[in-house]
Each structure stands twice: as C-alpha cells, then as structure tokens.
Amino acid sequence: MYIGKAIDTSIHAHHAIQIVLSFPEPFEIILPGSSFKLKAAIIDSDQPHECRTYDNTFLILNIAPESRIGIALKNNYLTNQRFAELPAEKTAEFIEHLQTELTEKKDSRNIFLITQKFLHTLSSIEELKSFDNRILEVLRLLDQQNDGTVRVADLAKKVFLSPSRLIHLFTSQVGIPIRKYILWTRLLVALERILVSKNITEAALHAGFSDAPHLNRTFKRMFGFSPASLLKNSQIVQVYRK
C-alpha cells in the first residue's frame, strides 16, 4: 500500500493489479485513447495507464494477480474490461476507517486488518479456515526471511516435502505460486533494508538482486514505481509481511 502524492508521470504498465482511491477529490485515469475521472477504481494487471491526481493525496493497493484475492477481483470487476469503478459505499467506509487509524494510532497491524477486510469484501471471498501445518511452517519461514537466499528446495526439505509437492500444495492453499510469493517477499525485504540504510544498492544485494538497477526494474515491473520514488513521495512507508 502506498499513500502519498502523485508519482506517475507517464503511461506505464505493471504486473500487480492496482486499486486507486483518492482523498477526497477525483483523479483521472488515462488509458490509450481514453480518460476517465473517478474516486475509486481497479486497474487490471499489465494494463498501460496513467493516474493524474493533481497534487491530491491518494492511495494505491498493489495486489498479486495470481493470488486468490487477485483472481477473485479479476472475476468480479475486470472481466472483458481494462479497469472498473469500485462501489462507492464500500470504498467510503474503508477510507473512513483507514483515515481514523492513520490520524490517531498509525498502528500497522490495524491498518493491515482494515485493508484485508476491504479486499475480502471486494473479492467476495473469505479467508481459508485452516492451513496444512507444513504450509504454515513455510509461511513462518518466509516471514522470518531477512535476505534473498531462500530457495524452494530448501523450504521443501525443511517441511519434508518434495519441491514439486510443495509447489502444488502452496499454490492450492495460499493461492499464489510459491516462487512469485518468494519474489514479493524479497522485494519487501529490500524495502525494509532501504528504510534502514537509505542505500538502494546495499538493499538490492541484501535481498538477492544483482544490483540496484535489477531491484529497480523488478520493483517497477511489479508495482509501477521505483523504491526511490516511493521513499521520496510517500506520506507513510511501512512494510508489513504477514
């Protein structure tokens, strides 16, 4: 989640599904050959677009299209269309709760739970009631990851599964391929390091990327902006890996 001023300067595309909400004025979505003014929208993955906010504060949620929520959002809002306007009542309630939290407590756990509830409301799905204990252990190991050295084979060995069985079970339970999950985790590890060191090269190497340009390219391809621009423009930068 990004909260801040405009960071889009030209038509671009990225792999993440993007939800954009304005506080409080409408923003403009520009697509090749058309433009629209909205207050809340969802934009499909890999869809060229630009968001113009005219210096207003806005919020971006980036969601893995391979995840259960991502798939459900595509089915609910993005069937045969590049973007869609989100329900006004649901988004207004989310923004109200979020602004209260950001203003008063700034508790990252509560912000995460509020956002998670909003996404599950939009996607019309519920959280899985139970996980296989081996997948819970893999998630715990990935949550504790503090560099870019994790490998599927190593994780499989620790939970007594073959790599192929782990790949299948992880996708069916978590809703996103494990290698994609690991990549997103590495990007968050890099961002955590940047918050501490303010050095993108150091963060890139620490998270297993070959250099700063490699991290920048991967981050921008996934989320639509570079780590440097996020840190420069964001009102609040908080990494929450749960």
Image: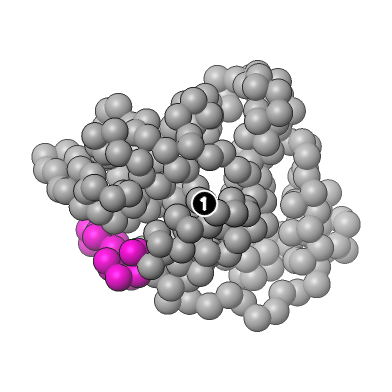
Can you tell which quarter of the image residue 87 is in?
Answer: bottom left
Q: Secondary structure at mark 1?
A: helix
Residue 178 visible (yes or no): no
Crowding around mark 1 (Cα neighbors within 10 Å: few <14, some 14 to 19, many 20+) is some
Q: Residue at x 59, y 51 (%)?
A: 106
In the image, residue 15 lies at what x, y percent?
A: 43, 44
What's the magenta region? Answer: 75-92
In the image, residue 194 lies at what x, y percent?
A: 65, 28
Q: How is the image coloured?
A: one colour
In the image, is residue 68 above or below residue 102? Answer: below
Can you tell which quarter of the image residue 124 is in?
Answer: bottom left
Farthest front residue in view: 104
45 to the left or right of 237: left
153 to the left or right of 158: left
- Residue matched to label 1: 102
Q: Residue at x 21, y 52 (%)?
A: 38
Q: Residue at x 29, y 33 (%)?
A: 55
Q: Residue at x 40, y 62 (%)?
A: 96
The amino acid beneath tag 1 is Leu
In the image, is residue 54 above or below residue 142? Answer: above
In the image, is residue 107 above or below residue 126? Answer: above
**Quarter that holds the C terminus:** bottom right
Q: In terms of depth relative to the viewer, which is nearer, 72 or 24?
A: 24
Q: In terms of depth relative to the viewer, which is nearer, 52 or 128?
A: 52
Q: In terms of depth relative to the viewer, which is nearer, 114 or 217?
A: 114
Residue 133 visible (yes or no): yes
Farthest bottom residue in view: 129
In the image, residue 82 lies at what x, y percent?
A: 25, 53
In the image, is residue 82 above or below residue 169? Answer: above
In the image, residue 178 lies at what x, y percent?
A: 65, 55
State yes or no: residue 131 in magenta.
no
Q: In terms of depth relative to the viewer, which is nearer, 182 or 62?
A: 62
